[in-house]
Amino acid sequence: MTGGSALPLGDSLEVWVAILLIGVATYGFRISFIHLFGRIDEVPDRIKRLLRYVPPAVLAALVLPDLVTLRPSVAATLVDERLIAGVAAGAVAWRTENVMATIATGMVTLWLFRFVVFA
Amino acid sequence: MTVDGDRLADGLLDGDVWAGVRDMSPLLFGIVPFALVAGIASVDAGLGLVEAVGMSVIVFAGASQLAALDLIESNAPLAVVVGTAIVINLRVVMYSASIAPHFAEYGRRFRAGLAYLLTDQAYALSVAEFEANPERSRWRYYAGAGAALWVVWQVGTVVGVVVGASVPDAWGLTFAVPLVFLALLVPAMKDRPTTAAGVAGGTVAVVAGGFPLNLGLLTGAVSGVVVGLLTEVVGE
């Protein structure tokens, strides 16, 4: 935990507050133009262009920190069971675009390196 | 007035509702592992069954749920948890705008109900179907597709909580979280600007991993969007 004034999400009340705030905002996004239709028919072009880059940017920012930990040497950074499993899973995702096959490849590769190769 | 023939043929389900359910079903194979992982991640983040299901019902948006759970687990401040989830769900505004004309004929309250079921999958299926098959009942098809996804999402969350609570930590089941995102990321990087957005977003998030308040993800996401836009401008 960093930052003393921050609200740690340790207990149930804070978790519920987070769930409610995210839920209200997300519902707001869902209903936005469905509700406004007739008054505003189109997302302004500038916003549309910006929103196009949200999925790849967000997803990559979610994925990579779970696969890569920067270490003092390049070798130590690359020889990591999570990164190896991620590369294997990424190749399968690219070839098949199948969620199940991607997860299966990644998990099996992770276990192979964690329990057999690096054990 | 005659009774709808499809309704007789399908028993409980109306023909248009059923078409939505049927078209959604192949996509559910991708949703099942996603929902299981949401349940497993909930356990890891210290949530109970009621909180996990509460999140799946109230938020009902997988990627943002997983990101929020990850941040809750690492004790991020409330504002960062909520802010990150909001950025992830911004894309839904696009779906809302794109599907809105199809719902224009319905009343305001009814539309408010339909909006709740708006997801990547229900949106993509419905808009494609309305193009291909204009006489299809808009709300019935969309509601069938959306409700099928909703049910699988909730059941999957519950099963995930049970599984997550009974599998040893050493198996690293939460590694399935980045794998799910990876499966979504690869098709999202479909041209040069979107690929640049992904590469920049991921790289910055890794480098910013040590940022205070777990702001690394948010910093990476914003950087990725900016780099995507810049790449698009340079390419023009």
Image (cartoon, rainbow, N blue to C red):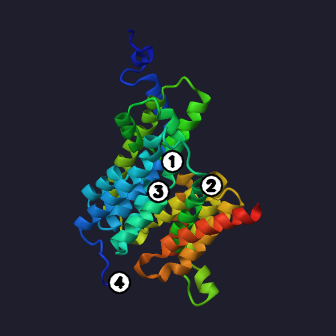
Label 3 SS: helix
Q: Dot 2, how many residues are within 10 Å of its Cα: few (below 14), some (14-19), or many (20+)?
A: some
- Identity, as a three-letter code, of the amino acid under mark 3: Asn
Which residue is denoted by mark 4 in the rendering? A3
Residue placed most toward the observer, B174 or B222: B222
Q: CA distance from mark 4 to mark 2?
A: 37 Å
* Location of the C terminus of chain B (image quadrant): bottom right
Q: CA distance from mark 3 to mark 4?
A: 26 Å
Vertical placement of residue B159 versus B235, above or below: above
If you read the primary sequence from the N terminus, does the residue marked by circle 1 or circle 2 appear first? 1
Q: Position of residue A103 (x, y in %)?
A: 52, 59
Give the residue displayed 52% in from the left and 53% down from the top.
Answer: A100
Chain assignment, label 1:
B
Which residue is denoted by mark 3 in the rendering? B89
- Identity, as a three-letter code, of the amino acid under mark 4: Gly
Q: CA distance from mark 1 to mark 3?
A: 10 Å
- Identity, as a three-letter code, of the amino acid under mark 2: Pro
Q: Dot 3, how many residues are within 10 Å of its Cα: few (below 14), some (14-19), or many (20+)?
A: many
Vertical placement of residue B64 versus B103, above or below: below
Q: Are marks 4 and 2 in contact (CB under 8 Å)?
A: no
Q: Are marks 3 and 4 in contact (CB under 8 Å)?
A: no
Chain assignment, label 2:
B
Q: CA distance from mark 1 to mark 4?
A: 36 Å
Pointer 1 and pointer 2 on the same chain:
yes
Residue B187, labelled with which disc? 2
Chain assignment, label 4:
A
Q: Nearer the viewer, mark 3 or mark 2?
A: 3
Q: Position of residue B196 (x, y in %)?
A: 67, 66
Which residue is denoted by mark 1 in the rendering? B120
